[in-house]
Image (spheres, rainbow, N blue to C red):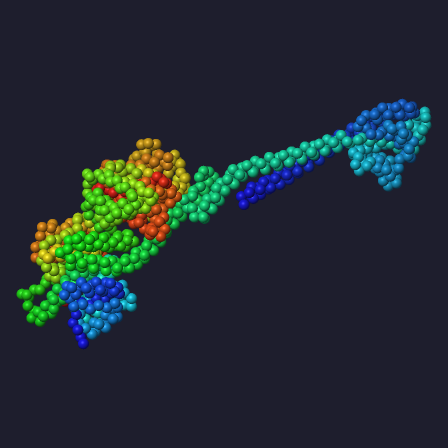
Amino acid sequence: MIRKIGIKLIVIVGITAFVTIGVFSYFSITTQSDALLAEVERQANQLGETIKYSIRYDMLLNQRDRITKIIQDIGVQKSIRDIRILNKVGEIIYSSRPGDVGKMVDKKAESCYACHNANKPLSRLPIKERTRIYRTASDSSRILGIINPIYNEPSCWQSGCHAHSADQTVLGVLDVTLSLEDVDNQITRSEIDMLIFAISAIIVLSLIIGFFVRKWVSVPVNSILKATDEVSSGNLNYSIEDIRNDELGSLASSFNNMTKKLSEARLQLFRSDRMASLGRLAAGVAHEINNPLTGVLTYSSFLLKRTQNNPDLQEDLKVIVRETKRSREIVKSLLDFARQSVPKKNKANINEIIEQAISVVENQLTIKKIKLIKDLDSALPQITIDNNQMQQVFINLIVNAADAIPENGGTIRIISSSLNLSPIGIAHIKKALCIKRHDLIDNESKIDGLSMIKLKVKTNGEEGFVYLDPVYGKSRNRYGIEFNRKKDISIECPRCSNSLINEKQKCPVCGSAVYRFETPPNGFFEGCINRECGWQKWEDVDAAGQKEYIEVKVIDNGSGIPNDILPRIFEPFFSTKGQKGTGLGLAVIWGIIDNHDGTIKVESELNQGTTFTIRLPINSGR
Amino acid sequence: MSKEYDILVIDDEQVVLDAVNKICTAEGFKVDITASAVEALKKIEANQYKLIVCDIMMPDIDGFQFLDKIRKRKISSQVIMTTGYTTVENAVNSLNNGAIDFIPKPFTVDEILNPINRGMKYLEIQSMISKTKPFNDDSDIIYVPCPAKYYRLGYGSWVSVDFDGSTLIGVTDLFLRTIDSINEVELNNVEDEIIQGTTCAHLITGNGISHNVLAPISGRVIDRNKDLLTGAVVLEKDPYFKGWLYRIIPSDPDYELKNLIPCSSDRL
């Protein structure tokens, strides 16, 4: 397909070049050959006149030998074919070729045609009509002949020989024929030169066009084509690298933009779709599982009541009741997750929750020959969390880790610690307002699940939007418009067009203009408009200083997670366990951690192991 | 032909029927069971039941339709709703449609018996009222109804909207009358979120039984009654004013108040 554009262009340009050069060559060669012929004609004429005058005196003296000698001498020249003098009846009297003397010339022959056309000899022949060009044979070179009539003049009939009478007009003709071989050769040579020039011009033009078509059209179009193929086959993470600054470049960047939007839309659709089916599933599961659970819980709690004098039995029954209650909470949390409800938070020690989680799965680990290493920081403060949900998080993570460990055993390490983190790269803007208190948060464009901030940019009469990364200091902004920081730019609220540029300040790093908007309840957010600079300042957040987090790592040395599925593991129903799993575990975990204002991230190396890192804020704002 | 039962259990799950039957029978109640609401309506025509424990999600007629039919037929039995699909809507709808209590499945023995015992007590109080009413004897007040501007969820908890938009929530006197004297009140923490129709406090009585108080409205707790943490006397003495449980910032008061019963309707 692409080749065709190139070939079409080359053909069109080739034809244009061919026609142009052809027409040019035609006129050039015609003019050149006309000029050459005229020159030859002039020479021939001159030669005729010269011969005529050279022999005039001898004619008058009737010295035929001398005339013959002169004609023969002149006739030796290479370009001269024949010099003949014919008398009135057509007999050759003198000739440069001695054998021709005495022969009669047919008046209908080529050389005589100009005068004897109408069987009546002309008395006068204009100079223009004296020449003729002809070939003796079709493959011989052309011959230019010139007839020079010898008119009667007084000295002819007054001369002593009295060869001519006074009433004659024309005494005979001097016929000079010149070979046009040289001229023809020259013309042919220039024709060949022209042809060579035309062909090489076309070839060079085609090559140049081919090269630039390839460079400017084929390569970028191919890369876009490849990208569309990738996208249509489902790879929405594909983006076109190496974007040029021409129209195809803008096409490529808008294609990238489209793909990005498409991928976000798909993810959202996917999530909401999953959420909807998850909701239906949860309702079904809740109803179906809660009934049998009711049986277990009522009978076991009933037994517990009735066997108060049997401590052994009591102990076991308590486990059944406790675990059934936990199942009840899990089903409930499934419903809560589907309905995105708020967790029931209490102050709790994360280490205790980890210990409880471990006690639930300890047996499983022992059976699978998995060594569990606990490295818990005993000095951790209590944090506000939902015990059951958090326990579920750790049970899930440990079970996942255990599943990743091969049959011959391995280790799982659980580390809890506290850490201080600077707000840069963590704190994110949840609310942004312009002067007129319009919300700048755009819920339709998201990065890592966080809504971005939408600003209107006007520059050089063009308008477009810029989407700011809500995470403080990350600057993974998206630009819907190209602009140069040097030029006049206004940054405005998309709704009321009030300027967001802070006139009082310039960027302390690069001196560009600075935008500023309110981020209640955390004061104002400022940033440099220069794309390369990325300077940002969030005074209130900076002032609050470093934030304390509890960090829990669950590390296994199991099979690891392949890189291509790593970004998908928190999606609902994404499972690598086939029939063994529902694909809900990590999605539920993600939801729980998110509801606690925390973060969860995963790092994994194939066959080396996986590390899940959970961070929970110690002074939760809520 | 007409028999007198204490409890009718309606549930399409046999194991639930058996379990509730066993527990309640062991507790000394006379129990009848049925797997379908249609069947239950026939039984109600024929026999006398004090309390009905009814599942919500059932084939043919569901719990809400059943509740509706009972009310239309002016049957004196009180209904306790239960369901495996525990949602706030289900809980609130049940109480709003005339059920006296809501028990989410799965439940323990105590979790089913406490509401039943409260229900029995509630019936006793109701019958005492109907007996005393003709005499209109103010000196013998059985329970204090909640103040006119309050709203209540079922008969258990009340909510009062303050002028600043925050709300106070507490327990009704009627609820307190259905349980023994309280030893201890377990409250949630300040800053916790509470959700309408779910448990927001536990009242632990002298005999060690824990009664769940369902939140009448959702919101964030901004204050709780510290007097209750040391003793429940103030709650029993003055449940509508000094005995409040929480002060909360409601999350969606306009919508949620519509699902509650205005206390002014009790005074007609």
Between residues B96 and B231, which one lies in front from this camera angle?
B231
Q: Residue at x 86, y 27 (%)?
A: A96
Percent coordinates x, y for residue A488 in the rendering:
38, 37
Residue at x 70%, y 34% (from the top left corner): A191
Along the viewing direction, whichever of B183 and B90 lies nearer the viewer? B183
**Left or right of A425 on screen, residue A130:** right
The N terminus of chain A, quarter of image: top right
Residue A334 in percent (x, y) is at 28, 53
Q: Residue furthest bottom?
A: B1
Q: In this view of the protein, can residue A277 be seen by the observer?
A: yes
| Image-quadrant location for residue B112 | bottom left
Q: Residue at x 55, y 42 (%)?
A: A3
The vertical placement of A117 against B50, above or below, is: above
Residue A616 vertical position relative to residue B56 in the rendered view, above or below: above
Q: Nearer the viewer, residue B181 or B224?
A: B181
Measuring from the top left, give residue A567's x and y in whole percent. Answer: 36, 44
Above or below, comparing residue A288 to residue A494 in the picture: below
Left or right for B188, reference A421:
left
To which quarter of the image does residue A6 belong? top right
